[in-house]
Image (spheres, rainbow, N blue to C red):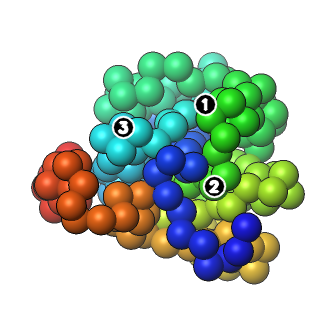
Amino acid sequence: MRATQRLTAPHGALLVVDVQEKLVAAVADGPKVVANVVRLVRGARLLDVAVQATEQYPKGLGPTVPTLAELIPERPSKLTFACCSAPQVLEQFYGRLVRHVTLAGLEAHVCVAQTALDLLDLGFRVQVPADAVASRNPFDRDVALRRLESAGATITTTEAALFEWCATADRPEFKALSALVKGPI
């Protein structure tokens, strides 16, 4: 797959990584990140993009924040940082013939980064909306994004990812997607 190939809804998936209560409270811009992740999930559902989520050690870090838990009821838990260790994640990607994955969540320099690197090694294209990931320390997030870009991931934004999935303004979902991008969550 070429690095310039666009990331389309039929061959894409969204993986929400560990957006849990204790982590959100600890990261820089937690509420903004959650709002953008919610936009991505709602947009993915609207455009029939596969959506999955994980939870890192929920006993210690708490559950996924309620707004996302309602949207993604099944969230396998894991102890490893990389999400590919949860069998359901790769099973769904392979079952839906996913070729590229959009990653959003926490923390950018740990679970998101390790998941992105694993997915790249497995041959998936990976995009990371910079406004939908965070770390406790913004410097860690920034370094992680640079590292992932160097490794071959595409760094983008929530709005850019949504409209790339949509691809055209004559799609019936375009109006709802535009409202999702412009409006409050």
Residue 27 visible, this orientation: no
Q: CA distance from mark 1 to mark 2?
A: 21 Å
User: Residue 125 placed where, x, y %?
Assistant: 68, 61
Q: CA distance from mark 2 to mark 3?
A: 16 Å
On the picture, is 174 further left or further right than 151? left
What residue is at 56 percent from the left and 54 percent from the top? 102
Q: In the image, what residue type sits under mark 2?
A: His
Q: Residues within 10 Å of mark 3 (few under 14, many from 20)?
A: some
User: Residue 46 placed where, x, y %?
Assistant: 31, 41
Q: CA distance from mark 3 to mark 1?
A: 20 Å
Mark 1 lies on residue? 55
What residue is at 51 percent from the left and 37 percent from the top? 50
**Secondary-structure class at tag 2:** strand
What residue is at 55 percent from the left and 34 percent from the top? 52
Q: Along the polypeptide, which appears first: circle 1 or circle 2?
A: 1
Mark 3 lies on residue? 45
User: Residue 109 placed where, x, y %?
Assistant: 68, 61
In the depicted view, which residue is nearer to us: 79 or 37?
37
User: Residue 76 placed where, x, y %?
Assistant: 64, 23
Residue 63 visible, this orientation: yes
Q: Residues within 10 Å of mark 2 (few under 14, many from 20)?
A: many
Q: Nearer the viewer, mark 1 or mark 2?
A: 2
Label placed on residue 100: 2
Q: In the image, what residue type sits under mark 1?
A: Glu
Q: Along the polypeptide, which appears first: circle 3 or circle 1?
A: 3
Q: Residues within 10 Å of mark 1 (few under 14, many from 20)?
A: many
The N terminus: image quadrant:
bottom right
Q: In the image, what residue type sits under mark 3?
A: Arg
